[in-house]
Amino acid sequence: MQEQEFPVSQNSNLIDKVEKEKEIIALINSKGTFTSQMTSENKSLLVANAELIAYIDCATNELHKTKTKIEWLVTAEDSKKNFIYNIEKYHIYHLKVKEADSSNFLLIDVLERDLENELLKETLKECEQKAAIVIEEPDLGKFTLDKNLNEFFSKIEWLNSKKLIEVSLNIGENTRVKALEKIGAYFNTLEKLVINKKEWDKKLKVYAAENLVDLANELRKNLKGMFKFIKIWKWRFIGKIELINLDINPNGEFIATFDDKKLFVGHKIVVNGNINGELLNSAIVENFNIEDYKKVELSLSVNDEKNEDVSNEAPTIDSDINDKDNTEK
C-alpha cells in the first residue's frame, strides 16, 4: 500500500507540528473508523479517525495506554470504501505514522494487519473487564452487565409508577458477543410478564397466599398481646405483600421476590414460575424456619400496630378470594 501524502498547502490541524515518522503497534478501540469535516478550504476531503486503546512504540517497545488517535485524509468516495485502510475495532495493526502532537498520529501506511500481540491482547482483556456493557431494549429500558455475577441488571416500572422493581437477567455470560447471542430469550420472558403485569401480579400474590397464609398464621400465634388472636385472611395477605424483584432465568423460568411487609418478620417471599406454560412451581419464605420462632414471643413495632386492620370486613379488591375466605370462617 502506498504511503499517504499530506498537502502542506491545506490549513488543517492534521498538518501542523508534524514530526518524524515512526512505527507503532496499535490496538483500535470500540468505535472503529469514523470521519469528521476538514477545517480547511478543501471541502472535498474528510478526516478519518480511529482511537487507540493502547499502542507499542516499535523503537522502544514501550506500552502506552494514554488516549490517542490516528488520523488520515479521505474523500467522500473513500468513506464508502472502508476509508482506504479498513481499520476495524479491536484489531491490532502495525502502522507507520507521523506524530502530530502528544495525542494524535497522522497515519502514513498500514504495514501489517491483525497482529498477534500478547501485551495488547492482555490490555484488551483488562478494558473489557472494566468497561460497562449496556444493552437497551426499547420497551424495557437499559440493562447493565455485572461481569462478576454474569447478570444484567435494571429497574423497571411495575404497578406503582413511583416505585421501581429490580430486574436481573441471569444470562451466565460476561462478554458482549455471547451476551447478545443469548439475551433475546430473556427479554422475551420479561416482556411477557410486563405486558400482562396486572394479571401476573395478582396470580403470583394469590399463589403465595394460598401456599403461605397458614404459615403466617402459625407464626402469628407467637405475637404478644391481642394480635395473636387476629387471623390473617388470604385477602389481607395478598393486599400486604409487594413485588420488589424479578429474576429471569433460562427457558422461560423466573423468580418473583416479594417484600413480606412483616408477615414473616422481614423474611422475603419467593415464588418460582415458568412463563411458557404459565406455571407457578413453588412459594417459600426465604431463610425462614417456623421452629426458630416458636421458642420466643414476638412483638409488633408501633408502626406495625398502627397498620394492623383488626376489622373482619374484607375489601372488595378480589371477590373470589373473599368468598374463599368466608367459607373458611
Image (cartoon, rainbow, N blue to C red):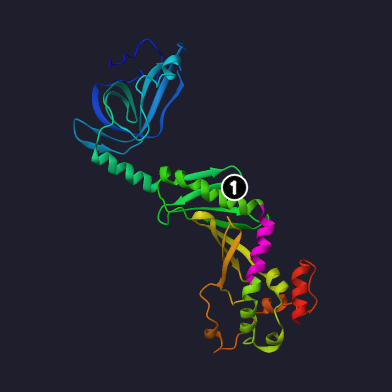
The quadrant in which the N terminus is found is top left
Query: Could you classify mark 1 by the number of other residues whose Cα lies within 10 Å: few (under 14), some (14-19), or many (20 or more)?
Result: some
* Nearer the observer, 146 or 23: 146
Is 86 left or right of 22, judged from the image as shown? right
Task: Please report the bounds of the magenta region as a residue range.
Answer: 196-208
Residue at position x 47%, y 55% in the image: 170
Where residue 46 sits, quadrant-wise, is top left
Report x, y in % for residue 187.
55, 48
Report x, y in % for residue 248.
53, 56
Is 217 left or right of 62, judged from the image as shown? right
Is 233 left or right of 104, judged from the image as shown? right
Query: Looking at the picture, does residue 287 appear above or below residue 274?
Result: below
Query: Looking at the picture, does residue 260 appear above or below residue 176?
Result: below
* Nearer the observer, 117 or 314: 314
Where residue 208 sits, quadrant-wise, is bottom right
Report x, y in % for residue 41.
46, 11
Residue at position x 63%, y 52% in the image: 194
Q: Based on the picture, tell me whether residue 204 belongs to the magenta stretch.
A: yes
Where residue 13 sits, quadrant-wise, is top left
Q: Based on the picture, tell me whether residue 31 belongs to the magenta stretch.
A: no
Residue at position x 75%, y 74% in the image: 324
Query: Looking at the picture, does residue 68 appear above or below residue 225?
Result: above
In the image, what residue type sits under mark 1?
A: Leu
Q: Is residue 237 visible?
A: yes
- Residue, disc 1: 140
Report x, y in % for residue 48.
40, 22
